[in-house]
Amino acid sequence: MLTSEDIVKITSVVATKEDIEDIKKDINGFRELIQALTISVDSLVKAIEGLKIEYLMVKNQIDRHEKWFHQVADKLGIKLEY
């Protein structure tokens, strides 16, 4: 048969309803935090993709301008040096 000492020892080891509710609240808090972080990372990825596209467009424009400079220099008989 269990003594009151045994019951005290068991209850000190076993989680109570309050302990389980606290853990559930913590898990819900972590879930919300992870969701917020996921949304933030997604926004950053979209921003980076936009910058990547913009960078490619600027690079193409610079290449086009460089080509034009060489065409003008050839027509004027000027040698461009780097």
Image (cartoon, rainbow, N blue to C red):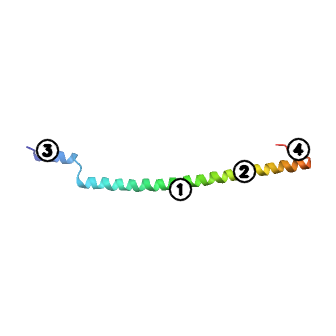
The dot on residue 60 is 2
**Which residue, given by chain and number where applicable, does mark 4 sit on?**
79
* Residue 79, position as x, y percentages in the image: 88, 44
Q: Name the residue that disc number 3 marks.
A: 6
Identify the mark nearer the N-term, 2 or 4. Answer: 2
Q: Which mark is residue 43?
A: 1
24 relative to 47 in the view: left or right: left
Q: Earlier in the sequence, mark 4 or mark 1?
A: 1
Q: Viewed as shown, does residue 60 lie left or right of 33?
A: right
Disc 4/disc 1 C-alpha distance (Å): 47 Å
Q: CA distance from mark 4 to mark 3?
A: 97 Å
Picture coordinates of residue 38 (x, y %)?
A: 47, 53
The x and y percentages for residue 26 are 34, 54
Q: Residues within 10 Å of mark 1 (few under 14, many from 20)?
A: few
Q: Which amino acid type is marked by label 3?
A: Asp
* For marks 4 and 3 on the same chain, the one whose residue lies earlier in the sequence: 3
